[in-house]
Amino acid sequence: MITIFAAVDKRQIEKFENGAVSKKTLTNILVKSDRIGLSQIDRALNVLSGGDEESPYWAVFGGEVLAGGDGEALTVDPIPFEKKSSDVFEVCDPAVYQNEEEVCLISEFLEEIDEAVFKIQFDAKIKKLTKWSLFSQKKKELKENADEIFGVFWADFDRLKSFYKNIHAYECVVIFTLYEEEDFEMSD
């Protein structure tokens, strides 16, 4: 799973919502926009939130569902699945967007977190996970790989901070998730 954050001119969002820009055109705009793809940002935000679902850090994934003039939500690259029972379904999340005010607020609270603060939260999370893990092998692996895991989580978080910091005043952020078949274990 990769979460994509794309900076898009708010006028393009308005045109899409009013039906003046097609899904295909908006998708092309997203492809050409200033964007980042982060594979561990959900885990990094979980570290900061302390597992609290009401934490303001989850606002990073929030926003209005991006829907066209037809009222249909924009989905990007849905993954089709067929189960043994021959039921077919697609996995995708609707794209959401954040307006300029939301982008500014998110940028401000992301900027407050530096590497030292993130490390304190990360260490607390690792301690909690190793304390409550039922499997001694998992505890050992978490402890042995904690520095590497921290590095990956911090890198994603730091890229997200930089992305929001560099957004222009007229831009919104569009967020969507790309899934790969490997992201899901299917069983009947």
Image: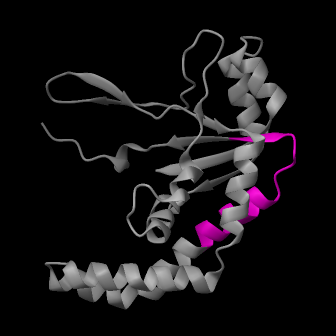
123 is higher (above) or lower (below) than 48: below
44 is higher (above) or lower (below) than 147: above
Quarter holding residue 8: top right
Q: Which residues are magenta?
A: 155-173
Locate residue 73, reporting x and y percent. 54, 22
119 or 185, which is in the foreground? 119
Q: Is residue 162 magenta?
A: yes
Asked if residue 73 lies left or right of residue 99, the reply is: left
The residue sitting at 57% across, 25% down in the picture is 74
Asked if residue 154 lies left or right of residue 89, the reply is: right
Quarter holding residue 143: bottom left
87 is higher (above) or lower (below) than 3: above
The residue sitting at 13% across, 78% down in the picture is 134
The residue sitting at 67% across, 55% down in the picture is 106
184 or 132, which is in the foreground? 132
Q: Is residue 8 magenta?
A: no
